[in-house]
Image (cartoon, helix red, strand yellow):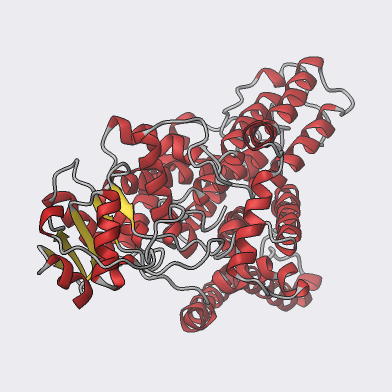
Amino acid sequence: MLRPAPPPGREAGGALDAGSSMGGAPASAAPFARDLALVTLAKAAVSALVLALGFRAVSDDDFARVVLAQAWAHAPQVDPTGTSWLPVPFWLNGALFLLLAPTLDVARAVAFALGLASAALVYVSARWITGDRRAALAGALLAGAFPWSACLGVATVPELATAALSLFAVASLVTPPAGPAPPAGRALLGALALVLATLSRYEPWPVAVAFAALALLAAARLGQGRAAQAKLALAALVALAGPAAWIAWNRVAHGEALHFLARVAAYRNAVSPGGDGTLLRLFAYPAAMVREEPELFLSPIALALVAWRARRGAAAPRRRARAPRPFPPLLRAALPYALPGAVAAFQIAALSLALVRDGAPTHHPERATLLALLLLALAVGDLTERAFRGASSGARRALGGALLVVLFVGVVFRPHLRREHFNPRTDEVAIGRAAAELTPPAAPVLVEVVDYGHLATLAALGRPGGAHPDRSIDPRDPPIRSSFDDPASLARRAADVGAAYLIGRVRPSVSAFAGPPLETRGAWGLWAAPAPSTRAAPPAGPGDGAPGRAPSTEAAP
């Protein structure tokens, strides 16, 4: 966007033009549609493979988001959670729950569809950045297949869609190697994408600031028409609308404009009071990127080494005779990635500073760096395709061998690099599904809270108005014993909520109160709660298992 303004009449071009061929002619709609369909089908295949391998969730946040969307569908309100979590994902899932059914299966189907839509956005972004059909296709295919992109394409969290919207926005400002400068109307589309992104996750907020600054700089170019300047200035304002609206809402609803930051910091301090040192926090995001996706960082190194060796080996013969280059020059093709790369670097720097101040996600930091990972995947796929296209046969063989070595290193060392693992909560989901099938829809159910795995049970049960967690385990609350620990406490808690059924771990304290379970799934069981008239009067005692505050689902912003 910072190149000289396009000639008169150029600005009238469509904002959705997929890009240009290397010769500058507009891309044909038919090949673009075929490539887009190929990218979408490839993403569907990757997502199906991930599900077939057993992946279901990144963390308990996945289930928390489903539970909160179910609650919104049960009782819609402007701010779905009243916490620090941003509203758009809950509006979307909650609206679809109202149209279809408030079930975990519907939430997972929506996640699958959003993964496909994200892949399509990434491909459009690649066309805008590269201006080359084959390079964009190679980059988009890789961006849809690396492990974190693959997993987040089916998880019920908004990170992939948010990163794809952010990439789409940044790409709308990029001028491809062969030009022309993008139409100003494209920046408006990018700004609208950022409104959705910034009201879904916090990590696009620095991207919105950078986008607004770049759009204003582009509007100030010499030779820019007034209509284009107005569009770019409007795009800058629209890009900041999401954060501005959320800050204003917090001021009105909570009396403090940055209320959400205080909540995030309080939760993080409660989870890890000591925390890591400042230096470790500053480098946490870059380290997480390298640790989680080492192949994406090794591939450019392999590409550079093969190019260096090929050119060095051909230097002497070329001095004696004009021979063709053994390896194509890739620097010019990489230049369009400078602008989005700078925006991604700014985002990571801002997140690192937020982490130092306890205002960042409490786990899986690589999720917040997905914009940079998608951009890196696009660049690797793009430059690798160009290298194979223009290299000599010997250089192609060397490059193929180097990439195989990178894959081998990744396969061997990846299991030792990853730090965070997650139990998919298979049993908790299974007992929730069983309860949904075996109990009347209006029957109140008391659910044992051992850890945040109870959220998987609540999501599978799908009854936001009729499911009652037995206690809060929010680290900001005082510790409370589980009411399922002894029959007397369980009897009191069941009476408090009028529970007709119980879901908990199969153990003597529950069987002593409710008898044998109606159904079991792994270590979990479903019981019919005894009618109040048949319950033995519990002895007076302290309120073990007192409800306190409802269990928090605010595991991360």
Q: Quadrant of residue 508?
A: bottom left
Count of numbered labels shown in the rendering? 0
Left-right relation of 302 to 43: right
Q: Please name whichever residue, 289 or 408, is drawn nearer the observer in this view of the structure.
A: 289
Q: Please name whichever residue, 406 or 321, is drawn nearer the observer in this view of the structure.
A: 406
Residue 28 at x, y = what percent?
A: 51, 31
Q: Please name whichever residue, 218 or 53, is drawn nearer the observer in this view of the structure.
A: 53
Left-right relation of 229 to 373: right
Residue 530 at x, y = what percent?
A: 13, 58
Task: State the residue lying farthest toward the front.
Answer: 540
In this rendering, does residue 418 appear at all? yes
Task: State the residue lying farthest toward the right.
Answer: 222
Q: Please name whichever residue, 385 or 104, is drawn nearer the observer in this view of the structure.
A: 104
Work out whether 13 lies above or below 175.
above
Left-right relation of 204 to 445: right
Q: Quadrant of residue 214?
A: top right
Quarter holding the N terminus is: top right
Residue 277 at x, y = what percent?
A: 74, 75
Q: Residue placed at 46% from the left, 79% from the top?
A: 411
In this rendering, does residue 326 appear at all? no
Q: Residue placed at 58% from the left, 63% from the top?
A: 362
Q: Residue placed at 64% from the left, 50% from the top?
A: 203
